[in-house]
């Protein structure tokens, strides 16, 4: 298959062309609309033309109109790829002749989905293309020992390959700019440019490039890692220290490999992810008793998600909010402190026996289950050390089930981004008690594991982008009274 990539930005052309070449396209490039018309007149007919909007000499809208008006080109598959995202602007591009529209920044998976929708290639071809190559990992750490252990352990997995290694943040930024990998493993404390500063620069270059941070399980490491997560890191891993090489390899293999594979949207899972998102089970409840408590489940990508949802719920929600975020004990106290500053209201680690009051925001402490005891009029916190559920302690299922027992139909569950299926059984308990469940949508999730399980089970009555969840919670609490 052939493609012509039209964009005045050379880096943008390279990103699009690279994604297309992975799908076995032969790519030609043009820097503006006029040059594109010359290439089309002189070269073989392509199967696809991607068009940027804003270009000198001839912009993308004019190019679309000219191609649609030319007998030879009017049936070309034309895909506009632009930073424009307003609905009216997208409709303008479609009216000018684009078959479809992709907003920058985009993932390779999102582009592949559009191509399948256009009939340019099949889901089978997309999956076969992904199977040809491993996930390319960029290692960034100033410790030669850690780099060596990471490289040896990760490359033992046939799905992973090392794209390169950098000894400081500045080198990492330069390597990402020159040849973006599939994922970055980034140390926090490094010379020249530290991990958080490097992360911010990487985010400017590649807003959707997955990044996993390393930190030691210390108070200092927890603070730095949370700063990184709130600055846009997708996940973190505990850097092994003071262990024998074999034990270090086991930690890397057991903790890190699964996170890499979950975060990189490999198109070998395309046929599953390309299916339409299942519909919500029913419209949001307009009647019924008041919302008496909000319970939230979140894992991978959680700190950033909570930092957006909680402030959007308003300073006077009037009902308690209880949260399970999958994190070790070193981290949850620091997360509560950071969220307090962001929300402008206290966020506390839950304490055993505490009476739960309206407007409380309570976070499950790392390593302990958070449950609700008592009755709806005098609920209190119960912390337990019972075995993990779904390999998690704290577990959202424990919180959700107990909340449904205490508050019955007054529970509003929220399931945000995260790996695995924690929250699924608990969401079912909430629905069976008469409560409601909101799930984050796939596109805005770092990993659509937990919310995806709830949606596919038909338990969510709303599937929303992250930015709409806080306002929706506020609306439901106000609409159903207090």
Image (spheres, rainbow, N blue to C red):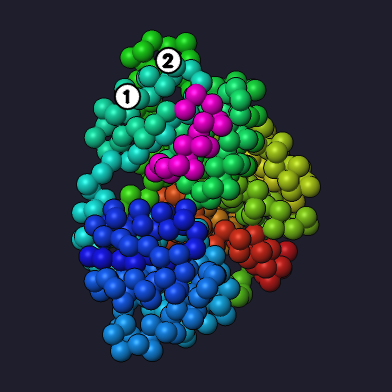
The picture places residue 335, in percent across and down from the top left corner, at 65, 36
Q: Is residue 292 visible?
A: yes
Label 2 residue SS: helix
Near-viewer residue (60 or 300): 60
Q: Which residue is mark 1?
A: 153
Residue 169 falls left or right of residue 109: right
Q: Residue at x 47, y 11 (%)?
A: 242
Q: Residue at x 30, y 89 (%)?
A: 71
The picture places residue 149, in percent across and down from the top left corner, at 37, 19
Query: Which circle's residue, 2 or 1, is located before the other in the chain?
Result: 2
Q: Which residues are magenta?
A: 166-182
Q: Which residue is mark 2?
A: 145
Snapshot quadrant of residue 6:
bottom left
Near-viewer residue (171 or 267): 171
The picture places residue 139, in percent across and down from the top left corner, at 43, 30
Q: Residue at x 59, y 41 (%)?
A: 201
Label 1 residue SS: helix
Q: Quadrant of the N terminus?
A: bottom left
Residue 297 versus residue 66 in the image, above or below: above
Q: Is residue 270 visible?
A: no
Q: Quadrant of the C terminus?
A: bottom right
Q: Which mark is residue 448?
A: none
Snapshot quadrant of residue 25:
bottom left
Per the image, is 46 magenta?
Answer: no
| Badge 2: residue crowd in 10 Å (few <14, some 14–19, many ≥20) | few
Residue 349 falls left or right of residue 69: right
């Amino acid at each position: 298959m052939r493609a012509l990539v039209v964009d005045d930005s050379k880096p943008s052309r390279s990103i699009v062309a690279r994604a297309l070449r992975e799908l076995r396209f032969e790519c030609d490039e043009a820097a503006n609309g006029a040059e594109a018309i010359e290439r089309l007149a002189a070269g073989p007919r392509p199967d696809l033309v991607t068009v940027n909007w804003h270009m000198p000499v001839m912009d993308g809208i004019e190019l679309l109109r000219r191609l649609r008006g030319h007998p030879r080109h009017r049936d070309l598959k034309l895909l506009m790829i632009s930073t424009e995202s307003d609905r009216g602007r997208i409709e303008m591009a479609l009216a000018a002749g684009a078959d479809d529209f992709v907003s920058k920044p985009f993932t390779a998976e999102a582009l592949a989905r559009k191509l399948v929708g256009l009939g340019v290639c099949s889901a089978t071809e997309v999956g076969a293309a992904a199977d040809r190559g491993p996930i390319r990992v960029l290692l960034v750490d100033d410790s030669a020992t850690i780099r060596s252990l990471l490289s040896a352990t990760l490359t033992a997995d046939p799905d992973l390959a090392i794209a390169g290694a950098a000894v400081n943040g500045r080198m990492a930024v330069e390597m990402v700019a020159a040849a973006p990998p599939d994922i970055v493993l980034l140390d926090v404390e490094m010379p020249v440019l530290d991990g958080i500063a490097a992360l911010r620069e990487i985010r400017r270059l590649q807003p959707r490039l997955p990044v996993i941070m390393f930190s030691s399980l210390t108070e200092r490491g927890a603070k730095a890692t949370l700063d990184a997560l709130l600055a846009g890191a997708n996940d973190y891993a505990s850097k092994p220290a003071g262990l024998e090489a074999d034990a270090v390899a086991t930690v890397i293999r057991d903790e890190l490999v699964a996170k890499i594979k979950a975060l990189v949207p490999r198109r070998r899972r395309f046929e599953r992810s390309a299916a339409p998102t299942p519909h919500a089970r029913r419209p949001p409840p307009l009647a019924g008793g008041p919302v008496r408590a909000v319970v939230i489940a979140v894992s991978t990508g959680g700190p950033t998600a909570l930092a957006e949802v909680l402030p959007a719920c308003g300073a006077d929600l009037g009902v308690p909010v209880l949260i399970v975020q999958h994190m070790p004990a070193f981290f949850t106290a620091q997360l509560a402190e950071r969220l307090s500053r962001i929300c402008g209201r206290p966020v506390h680690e839950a304490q055993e026996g505490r009476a739960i009051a309206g407007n409380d925001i309570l976070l499950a402490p790392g390593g302990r289950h958070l449950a609700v005891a008592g009755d709806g009029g005098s609920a209190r916190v119960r912390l337990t050390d019972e075995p993990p559920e779904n390999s998690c302690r704290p577990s959202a299922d424990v919180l959700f089930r107990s909340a449904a027992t205490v508050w019955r139909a007054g529970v509003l569950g929220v399931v945000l981004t995260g790996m695995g299926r924690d929250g699924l059984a608990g969401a079912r308990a909430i629905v069976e008690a008469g409560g409601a469940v909101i799930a984050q949508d796939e596109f805005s999730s770092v990993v659509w594991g937990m919310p995806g399980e709830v949606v596919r089970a038909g338990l969510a009555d709303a599937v929303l982008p992250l930015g709409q969840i806080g306002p929706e919670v506020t609306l439901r609490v106000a609409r159903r009274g207090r």
